[in-house]
Image (spheres, grey):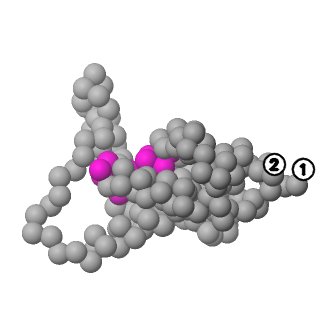
Amino acid sequence: MDERASGGGDPDGPLVERMARGDHEAARELVDRHLSNILGLAARMLGNRHEAEDIAQDVFLRVWTHAGAWQPGPARFATWMHRVALNLCFDRLRRRREQVMDELPERADDGPDPAHSLYANQVAQRVAEAVAELPERQRAAITLCHYEGLGNIEAAQVMEVTVEALVSLLGRGRRALRKKLMPERESLLGDL
């Protein structure tokens, strides 16, 4: 059996091959397997659940239409999907900066359910705001590694940078977050 027929060792390879032949069940399985990760990445990058859903829909539409062209290689298929999602998020963020808005858009409430304490909500909200204030590439690195759980090598592949560049982005992002959040730490801890 050749590498193409076996999916090249990629756990998604057989599903992608079936999708390329028009197998709708394989597409459903791939969506079930990866939807929450793609939605999470997009929601953290964009800060808006509705826009994240649009991004996820675009990603899986591209997966369906390009499944036949996919070739196994050093990067897994999931890495390619994360890269597509990240590129779509970057495009959306660039368009936001280019638009002149008369009023601020409503933010989706992605916070924890009401059973969580007010303190946890305050901390989570402030961390999310601080991450949203980071430059795009630092935000992407932090999101991929800390929220999506990707390792440095896979996150570097998604971002199309070297591992060293990713580590640098992570370091700068962490330092910026520490600097932004440190003054508030005392006030939040004082509320305990």
The residue under label 2 is 6
For the question of whether residue 42 can be seen, the reply is no
Looking at numbered disc 1 in the image, what kind of residue is underneath it? Met
Q: How dense is the environment of label 1, judged by Cα within 10 Å: few (below 14), some, or many (20 and up)? A: few
Q: Does the magenta run of residues contain 113? A: no
Q: Residue at x 71, y 59 (%)?
A: 75
Say what secondary structure mark 1 lies in. Answer: loop
> Does residue 110 show up?
yes
Q: How many marks?
A: 2
| Residue 12 pos. (x, y %) | 68, 46
Which residue does the image show at 62% across and 69% down from the upper left?
160
Q: First in sequence: mark 2 or mark 1?
A: 1
Is disc 2 in contact with disc 1, using a CB cutoff of under 8 Å?
yes
Q: In the orientation shown, which residue stands out farthest toward the right?
A: 1
The residues colored magenta run 37-50
Q: Is residue 108 above or below residue 64?
A: above
Q: Secondary structure at mark 2?
A: helix
Residue 40 belongs to magenta span: yes
Q: Which residue lies under the disc numbered 1?
A: 1
Examine the rendered structure and indicate whether residue 117 appears above or below residue 142: above
Residue found farthest to the bottom = 98
Crowding at dot 2, Cα within 10 Å, few <14 / some 14-19 / many 20+, comes out as some
**Residue type at tag 2:** Ser
Residue 145 appears at what percent x and percent y? 56, 51
- Residue drawn at 32 percent across, 32 percent down: 112
Residue 162: quarter of image: bottom right
Q: Main secondary structure of the magenta part?
A: helix
